Amino acid sequence: MLNLDIKRHLFLCCYDISDDDRRKRIRAIVKSFAIGGQYSCYECFLSRSEYQMLLRLLNAYSENGDSVVLQPVLSNKSIQCLGIAEAPVNIGFNYIG
């Protein structure tokens, strides 16, 4: 029987890349995993395999001098949102294909 209950965790992926072409490439990669975010910081609910895939892709396209951070968000703490920000919601499934 196929088990579709894949545990996913919330991460923030932030980057600071000076080269326009590399920044566009990194943004496209991160946004393909993201559920929301803005500018150079995105929220991503990732399974273990998605996390590993995103790390491989980021590592392949980033260079010395680039700054990329993939930070887990502790799930036992409530997320504080200010202004028009909305707390990220795990939709339970991302198709990457």
Image: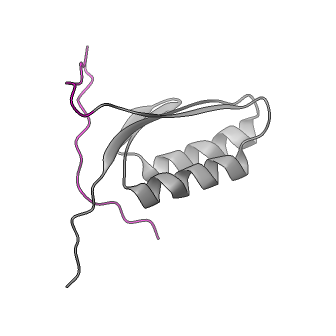
Question: Residue placed at 78% from the left, 29% from the top?
Answer: 65
Task: Tell me where the magenta segment starts and ends, as one range.
Answer: 75-97
Question: Residue placed at 23% from the left, 70% from the top?
Answer: 4
Whole-percent x, y for residue 18 in the image: 74, 28
Whole-percent x, y for residue 22 in the image: 72, 42
Whole-percent x, y for residue 14 in the image: 53, 31
Is 16 rendered above or below residue 22? above
Q: Is residue 65 left or right of residue 93?
A: right
Task: Kindly give the residue lying farthest to the right in the view shown.
Answer: 64
Quarter of the image where one finds residue 78: top left
Q: Is residue 78 magenta?
A: yes
Q: Nearer the viewer, residue 78 or 81?
A: 78
Whole-percent x, y for residue 47 in the image: 37, 55
Quarter of the image where one finds residue 19: top right
Q: Which SS type dominates the magenta stretch? A: loop
Q: Is residue 25 left or right of residue 51?
A: right
Quarter in which the N terminus is drawn: bottom left
Q: Is residue 95 left or right of residue 40?
A: left
Q: Is residue 8 magenta?
A: no
Quarter of the image where one finds residue 74: top left
Q: How many numbered callouts?
A: 0
Question: Residue placed at 27% from the left, 23% from the top?
Answer: 85
Q: Nearer the viewer, residue 78 or 16?
A: 78
Task: Kindly give the residue lying farthest to the top in the view shown.
Answer: 83
